[in-house]
Structures are given as structure tokens and as C-alpha cells.
Amino acid sequence: MRGRQSHQGGMFSYVSLEERVPAKHPLRAIRAVVDEVLAGMDTAFAGLYASTGRPSIPPEQVLKALLLQAFYSIRSERQLAEQIDFNLLFRWFVGLDVDDPVWHPTVFTKNRDRLLAGDVAGTFLGCIFRRKAPSGNGGKRPGRTVKAPSRFGEFAHP
């Protein structure tokens, strides 16, 4: 019997983004490393932001989005915002819930520029690249170190 297509959207979803991302997806391992590095960067972020005023995009989300932009060769911040808006994997990686609004591309660009000017993005990328890559043989052999670019802009805009 042929199934019927439902044209009525569901009001609620009971499946979390965490459950939708496959357990062996490569971004899971990358996200774990990124979250570990970002957890140690609170003092670097604190120096860039005022204690009062309108909240900005969390710097953790900006840096994660920049990684996605580099990994998936997304050419502009406008396209990046569009991808994050409808791609559940990207939302999960950046840390947005399904119903969270995605930032405007110009706001994202200003926040990115703040992180680049403060050299926080370069520090972040350097920490990521200095991490040891797993050897894949049960830890019998040490991993190798990946050489980091000197500035984040060299990585993001070759």
C-alpha cells in the first residue's frame, strides 16, 4: 500500500538535536575538542566584552561557526547564517536549539572582527592545532601534531 504524504507540520518535536547527530559523525570528536579548548578561554573572552549593554553573539558560537565555514567551504557569512538556519547538524555543532534564531550576517561579521582584532581567534585556532591527533591504534604510538597557521585570518581566508 502506498503511504501518504502529510502536509501538516508537527507542533512539537520530541527528538533532540543530540539524538539526531549520528554517534560516529566526525563533528562529534571535533566538537569535544573545541568545547574543551573553549572552556579554558573565558578570561580571553572577558577582556573583549563590556559588562553592560546589549548581549552579543556568544564568542564560542562565533568560533564554532567559523570552523564550520572553513570545514564546509562556505563562501560568505550570509551563506553561513543560512546554512546554520536550516541545517540541524550545524545548529547542533554551534550550540543553537531548533527554535533559536540565527544571528544576522552583519552582526556575525562584527563579532568575528572583534575576535580577530583581539587575537582570540588566533589563540583558539592555535590551541586546536596543538592538540595531538589520535593515532588510531589504541594509543600504542604517539599522535602527530598539526602545524597551525600564525593567524586565524590565514586559515579562514587563504
Image (spheres, rainbow, N blue to C red):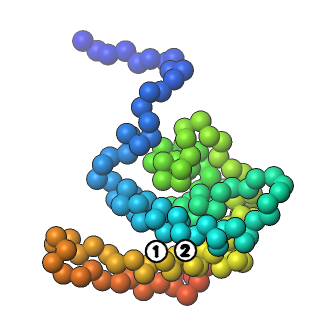
Q: From the viewer's perspective, is 115 left or right of 141?
A: right
Please tell me which residue is depicted at 46% across the width and 65% down the height of the picture. Answer: 36
Residue highlighted by disc 1: 128
- Quadrant of the rendered image containing residue 64: bottom right
Q: Amino acid at mark 1?
A: Ile
Q: For the C terminus, which image quadrant?
A: bottom right
Residue 120 in the image, given as x and y percentages of width and height: 63, 75
Residue 6 in the image, given as x and y percentages of width and height: 44, 17
Q: From the viewer's perspective, is 28 left or right of 110?
A: left
- Quadrant of the rendered image containing residue 57: bottom right
Q: Foreground residue, 152 or 46?
A: 46
Residue highlighted by disc 2: 124
- Element on which disc 2 rests: helix
Residue 86 in the image, given as x and y percentages of width and height: 54, 42
Give neighbour class at mark 1: few <14, some 14-19, many 20+ (Cα, 10 Å).
some
Q: From the viewer's perspective, is 90 left or right of 77?
A: left
Please tell me which residue is depicted at 49% across the width and 77% down the height of the picture. Answer: 127
